Image (cartoon, rainbow, N blue to C red):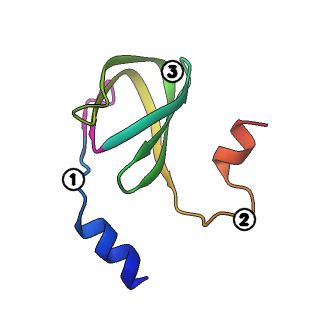
Amino acid sequence: MAEERKILANTTGHNVSMDNRERLRISGVLDVYGFDDTYVALETELGKMLVRGEGLKIGKLSLEHHDLVVTGFVYSLEYDDKKKGKGKGVFASMFR
C-alpha cells in the first residue's frame, strides 16, 4: 500500500470535470481501450475508469497531453480498483 501511494504521488494529475452531465473533461488519461455510444473505458493515472451514458462521443483525445473530452448524456462514472486475479469486475464482463 505504501508503494502505491508513492507511485500516486509521482503522477502528473488526474481530474474530472462535468458540465450538466453533457460534457465530461478528464485529465491524466493514459489510454482509451474501448468505446461506443453507451460507454467509454479508459486507463487513467489512478486506475481504470468506465463512463456510461447515452449518445457518448469522444470530442477530444490527446494522449500526448493526457486529456479526454466526452460529450453526450452521462449516467455514471466508476473506477475499477480490483487487483488482478480477484474476481470479475464490470470491466471483465464488458469484454467477454
- State which quarter of the image contains the C terminus: top right
Q: Which residues are magenta?
A: 17-28
The answer to which of marks 3 and 2 sits earlier in the sequence is 3
- Determine if the magenta segment contains residue 5: no
Q: Is residue 2 above or below residue 7?
A: below
Task: Tell me, for residue 85, which label it has, or none.
Answer: 2
**Residue carrying label 3:** 54
Q: Residue shown at 71%/46% (left/top)?
A: 92
Q: Secondary structure at mark 3?
A: strand
Q: Amino acid at mark 1?
A: Gly
Task: Tell me, for residue 49, which label it has, or none.
Answer: none
Q: Residue shown at 50%/28% (left/top)?
A: 53
- State which quarter of the image contains the N terminus: bottom left
Task: Tell me, for residue 13, which label it has, or none.
Answer: 1
Position of residue 85 in the picture relative to residue 58 (left or right)? right
Q: Which residue extends farthest front?
A: 64
**Residue 55 coordinates in the image, percent (x, y):** 48, 15
| Res. 40 visible in picture | no
**Residue 87 coordinates in the image, percent (x, y):** 75, 63
The answer to which of marks 3 and 1 sits earlier in the sequence is 1
Q: Amino acid at mark 3?
A: Glu
Q: Secondary structure at mark 1?
A: loop
The crowding category of the residue bearing disc 2, from other C-alpha atoms within 10 Å (few below 14, some 14 to 19, many at least 20), is few
Q: Secondary structure at mark 2?
A: loop
Position of residue 90 in the picture relative to residue 63 (left or right)? right
| Res. 60 visible in picture | yes
